[in-house]
Amino acid sequence: VVSPSPSLYSIFFTSPLQGWVVGQEGTIAWTQDGGRHWEFQPSATRESLYDVGVVGDTGWIVGDRGTVLVSATGGREWKKKDLGLESSFFWLLRLAVVPGDHAFLVGADGMMLSSGRASQHEIWVRSPGEK
């Protein structure tokens, strides 16, 4: 148990039993029993995390200062992802994941990113007002 409890900002379930919450200070927790028990997961960041999504084996989490975490294990493990952009100046607030390793991320100052793949060969596109 974390004391005091961190603020939580988003919740996402892939089934009635399996889900994740993310929040303050890099908090990630997941459940496999519909929320009766939660297990904290390491996040490799202390930045606040604002949204989480998992489709199949691919998962995404976004947060403060351009923080992006990716899972290739269906949300069991998370690794920090460098987008290759000066994204540390942008807060990423929401995301949408769709089958086929695609993710769409949005944040402060009109930041919109889309990925062609969550795995090895990403194609990141930024719009509108791209600099």
Image: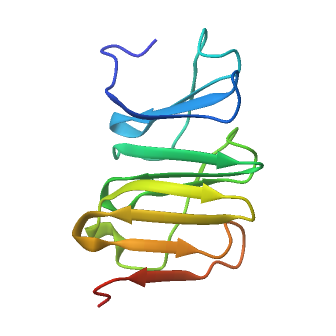
User: Which picture quadrant has residue 117?
Assistant: bottom right
Q: Nearer the viewer, residue 120 or 106?
A: 106
Direction from residue 114 to residue 47 in the image, left or right: left
> Can residue 26 be seen?
yes
Percent from the top left, x then y, of residue 52? 52, 45
Residue drawn at 51 percent across, 65 percent down: 104
Residue 40, relative to residue 14: is it above or below? above
Tell me the quadrant of the picture where the C terminus can be found: bottom left
User: Which picture quadrant has residue 23?
Assistant: top left
Direction from residue 126 to residue 96 in the image, left or right: right
Residue 22, relative to residue 124: is it above or below? above
Taking the view exactly as shown, the residue that stands out farthest to the top is: 36
Residue drawn at 65 percent across, 46 percent down: 54
Percent from the top left, x then y, of residue 39? 60, 21
Taking the view exactly as shown, the residue that stands out farthest to the bottom is: 131
Residue 116, relative to residue 70: is it above or below? below
Q: Nearer the viewer, residue 45 or 85?
A: 85
> Can residue 46 be seen?
no
Residue drawn at 33 percent across, 24 percent down: 6
